[in-house]
Image (cartoon, rainbow, N blue to C red):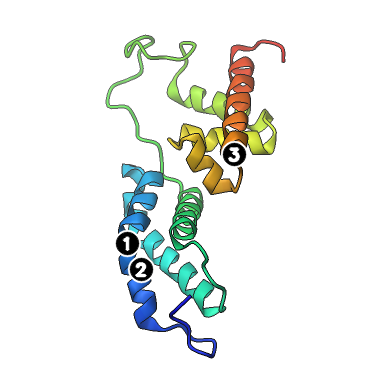
Amino acid sequence: MPGYDSGDTVDQAAFSDLIDTHARLIASAIRRVCSRRNAALIPDIEQDVRTALWKRLQDGKEIAHPVSYIYKVAMTTALAAVRRFPTAPELPAEPYESGSSGETFLGLRPAEQSRLLAEGLAALPLDEARAVRAHLAGFNHEDVAALFGWSAATARHRIYRGLAKLRTKLRGEPS
């Protein structure tokens, strides 16, 4: 890839061009992972992505497919940052009333729903749990496949099977 000197240094102009060319891609991948509650992390995550790309280029490793590589770096960096700095859940403005929203799961409070979901995800095989978590975060099967290095069919299968197992577990049905 152009932008390397013969030594271990990276051409700053080539690096700036790479970042400028893919700035929208980086920003959209990060926004996809960060919710409004994590908006304060976005500048730090962008800097972490730039650092990771700089290190990759400085090591002299070629980036064969820059768009997919940069997207993957941005997604994994954002996911790691959101996991590293979880935000406190927002408290409801009004006291909880059973059936007040009409959208309750088993008549449970949100904290209890979260606990049950976490237990259900912990009971899944690792790859299915990863796929389901990403799917619940809003990623489609193609995004999940790109994120974890799987084929689209494998990601779709793991999401489908993981959700089916999760539904069974949450309903209290035998496996």
Residue matched to label 1: 23
Q: Quadrant of the C terminus?
A: top right
Kind of element beneath mark 3: helix
Disc 1 marks a residue whose amino acid type is: Ala
Q: Secondary structure at mark 1?
A: helix
Kindly identify the residue that appears in the image at 47 percent across and 55 percent down. 68
Residue identified by numbered label 2: 19
Q: Position of residue 27 (x, y in %)?
A: 33, 55
What residue do we see at 41% from left, 14% from top? 104
**For the residue carrying disc 3, how many other residues have a C-alpha within 10 Å: few (<14), some (14-19), or many (20+)?**
some
Residue that protrudes farthest toward the bottom in the picture: 7
Residue 130's tag is 3
Instruction: Tell me where residue 2 appears, x and y as whole percent.
Output: 45, 78
Q: Position of residue 129 (x, y in %)?
A: 62, 34
* Separation of residues labelled 1 and 3 (CA atoms): 27 Å
Under mark 3, the amino acid is Arg
Per the model, the C-alpha gap separating discs 3 and 2 is 29 Å
Residue type marked 2: Ile
Q: Is residue 13 above or below residue 84?
A: below
